């Protein structure tokens, strides 16, 4: 089978944070093993409120059922405060001095730190700088977009791993979302070329039962 396809029902996906979660899911597998982000936790709570089972939430988001249960037990989308001591904290002053000298290049900052005898991994350094906003200012929403029914459809593609016929394989996931209702259509392809995109959009419009005023590709 060259293509595995799956269509989500409208009742499962009118979730405001699903697009945000899609962006989170593009991060590396190692990052997903860490603490869930606020958008992921919000998605879990919203899907649970719609009556979606814990097993299904865990499968769709690619996380463990234990993680789902912990979020539902806390009943909060807020990310828990990190309690353990940060490994980079003893080197805070050095990091602050090195950042302007290295023009914000964390690879160079890490090299300088280790050369001076600091015992610190590059991952611990980047996580420390990210949590404390030392390298980039926190992103702020620049506005709010409102769409009328039938006004716009957005589509995107991203690589994912799935189990097919008992084997793990990489696929290209194509998704299309109606901006007003948040109704979602998605399919998985072994490869995704221009011709595949034409077929995908045609099938998406058939699934939605009509065509909006415009179709946009998200970036």
Image (tube, rainbow, N blue to C red):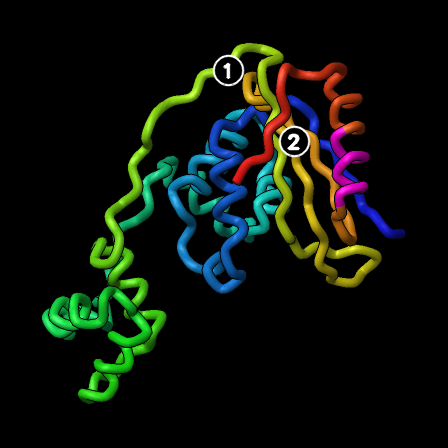
Magenta stretch: residue 196 in it?
yes
x%, y% of residue 73?
41, 41
- Label 1, label 2: how far apart the Cα atoms are: 15 Å
Q: Residues within 10 Å of mark 1 (few under 14, many from 20)?
A: few
As drawn, which residue projects farthest toward the right? 1
Query: Which mark identifies residue 147?
Result: 1
Query: Which mark identifies residue 126?
Result: none
Query: Which mark identifies residue 176?
Result: 2
The relative height of residue 136 versus residue 216 in the rendered view (above or below) is: below
180 displayed left or right of 136: right
Q: Which residue occupies 74% across, 14% down?
A: 210
18 displayed left or right of 112: right
Q: Which residue occupies 22% across, 82% down?
A: 112
Residue 33 visible in the displayed image: yes
Secondary structure that dominates the magenta span: helix
Magenta stretch: residue 169 in it?
no
x%, y% of residue 116?
18, 87
Q: Which residue occupies 76% across, 15% down?
A: 209
The relative height of residue 190 versus residue 10 in the rendered view (above or below) is: below
The stretch in magenta equals 194-201
The relative height of residue 92 versus residue 182 in the rendered view (above or below) is: below
Of residues 210 and 81, which is closer to you in this image? Answer: 210
């Amino acid at each position: 089978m060259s293509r595995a396809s799956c269509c989500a029902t409208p009742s499962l996906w009118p979730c405001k944070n699903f697009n945000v979660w899609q962006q989170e899911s593009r991060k590396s597998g190692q990052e997903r093993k860490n603490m869930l982000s606020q958008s992921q936790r919000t998605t879990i709570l919203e899907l649970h409120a719609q009556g979606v089972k814990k097993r299904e939430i865990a499968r769709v988001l690619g996380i463990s059922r234990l993680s789902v249960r912990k979020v539902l037990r806390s009943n909060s989308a807020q990310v828990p405060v990190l309690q353990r001591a940060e490994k980079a904290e003893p080197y805070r002053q050095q990091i602050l001095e090195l950042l302007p000298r290295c023009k914000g290049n964390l690879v160079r900052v890490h090299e300088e730190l280790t050369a001076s005898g600091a015992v610190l991994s590059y991952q611990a350094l980047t996580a420390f700088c990210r949590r404390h906003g030392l390298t980039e200012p926190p992103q702020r929403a620049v506005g709010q977009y409102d769409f009328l029914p039938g006004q716009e459809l957005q589509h995107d593609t991203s690589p994912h791993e799935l189990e097919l016929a008992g084997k793990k394989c990489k696929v290209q996931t194509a998704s299309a979302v109606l901006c007003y209702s948040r109704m979602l259509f998605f399919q998985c392809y072994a490869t995704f070329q221009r011709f595949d995109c034409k077929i995908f959009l045609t099938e998406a419009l058939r699934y939605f039962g009509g065509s909006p005023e415009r179709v946009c590709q998200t970036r």
